[in-house]
Image (cartoon, rainbow, N blue to C red):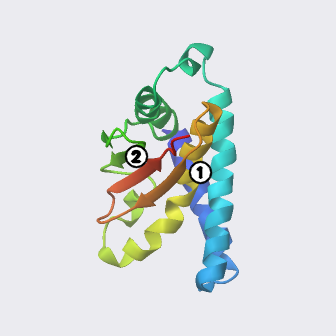
């Protein structure tokens, strides 16, 4: 319980610090702040991936890796499993969390919907970093249609 609260507080403070210098940074400044958060998440995701037991690193298929992220990694970070995983079997996966913990404090009103992307950049990086450690290069984006429901889209380019 305490770990969760501390993580949420740290995440909120990281976001607040990046936006504190210029509350309306414009398109260029906002992209830079989102990039910094995504980079932090990427480094954390790689570190978490490196600490995985060796038997989890022997996945045979992409779908098994994504299932692992939805169950084990999500539990390690957010103390809950991802609510759903969908795929088109062509390298695109959609992971949905119906009560994403980092969006729960804002779930009381629609006025916070436009603020949601800055609270998702770190987690996009986290997923991308964990996938990278498992040998999968990817592009991860997030979308929010209604708070606190969040969808992460993972695209794995075919080589």
Residue 133 visible, this orientation? yes
Expressed as whole percent of the image width and height from the top left, the position of residue 15 reads 60, 65
Image vertical order of residue 100 relative to residue 3, above or below: below
Image vertical order of residue 41 relative to residue 64, above or below: below
Provide the secondary structure element on which disc 1 rests: helix
Tell me the tag on residue 92: 2
Provide the secondary structure element on which disc 2 rests: strand
The residue located at (66%, 43%) in the rendering is 44
Q: Is residue 98 left or right of residue 30?
A: left
Q: Is residue 153 left or right of residue 42?
A: left
Tell me the tag on residue 8: none
Q: Nearer the viewer, residue 158 or 9?
A: 158
Q: Nearer the viewer, residue 116 or 109?
A: 116
* Mark 1 to mark 2 CA distance (whole Å): 17 Å
Rendered image quadrant of residue 106: bottom left
Expressed as whole percent of the image width and height from the top left, the position of residue 63 reads 41, 31
Rendered image quadrant of residue 53: top right
């Amino acid at each position: 319980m305490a770990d969760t609260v501390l993580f949420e507080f740290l995440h909120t403070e990281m976001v607040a610090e990046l936006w504190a210098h210029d509350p309306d940074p414009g398109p260029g400044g906002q992209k830079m702040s989102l990039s910094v958060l995504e980079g932090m998440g990427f480094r954390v995701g790689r570190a978490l991936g490196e600490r995985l037991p060796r038997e989890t690193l022997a996945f045979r298929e992409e779908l098994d890796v994504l299932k692992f992220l939805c169950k084990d990694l999500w539990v390690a970070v957010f103390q809950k499993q991802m609510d759903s995983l969908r795929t088109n079997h062509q390298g695109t996966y959609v992971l949905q969390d119906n009560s994403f913990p980092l969006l729960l404090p804002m779930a009381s009103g629609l006025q916070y919907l436009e603020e949601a992307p800055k609270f998702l950049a770190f987690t996009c990086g986290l997923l991308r970093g964990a996938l990278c450690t498992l040998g999968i290069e990817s592009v991860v984006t997030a979308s929010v249609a209604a708070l606190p429901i969040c969808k992460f889209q993972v695209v794995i380019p075919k080589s």
